[in-house]
Image: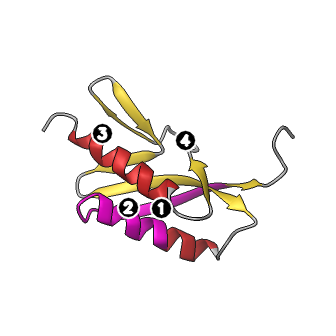
Amino acid sequence: MAGELLQLARAASRAALAVEGVAALGTGRFAEAATYEGGEKVTGVVVKNGAVEVHVILSYPLPRPVPQIAAEIAEKVSSETRGRRATVVVEDLEVEGDAGL
């Protein structure tokens, strides 16, 4: 189905951003983390065969320990992407009040 990868990536993006403590999606550290299809892309989510990789930036102070936040992201992303295995990559922390430093 045309656009299926982008639909899955958008669903994963929405699910990850809905989790408390997630400030934004990351872009990848050494290579761009994105899903491409039909001249469009969704940054921060890589959809592969049967799996989804989500790159996130968390807000500090954290509402819960990082492993708990990552587990919640993985669970929500998996449920929104038809049960695909979800891997969460925490790229960075955004510290409240650090904007512009």
What is the secondary structure assignment of the residue under circle 4?
loop
Q: How far is disc 4 from disc 1 in space, using C-alphas?
A: 13 Å
Which badge, 3 or 4, is on the more N-terminal residue? Answer: 3
Mark 2 near mark 4, Cβ–Cβ under 8 Å? no
Residue 2 location (% of width, % of height): 16, 34
What is the secondary structure assignment of the residue under circle 3?
helix
Mark 1 near mark 2, Cβ–Cβ under 8 Å? yes
Q: Amino acid at mark 4?
A: Thr
Quarter holding the C terminus is: top right
Mark 4 near mark 1, Cβ–Cβ under 8 Å? no
Residue annotated with mark 4: 27
Above or below 92: residue 83: below
- Observer-side mark, 3 or 4, equals 3
Residue 27 location (% of width, % of height): 54, 41
Q: Amino acid at mark 3?
A: Leu
Identity of the residue furthest to the left in this view: 1
Mark 1 near mark 3, Cβ–Cβ under 8 Å? no
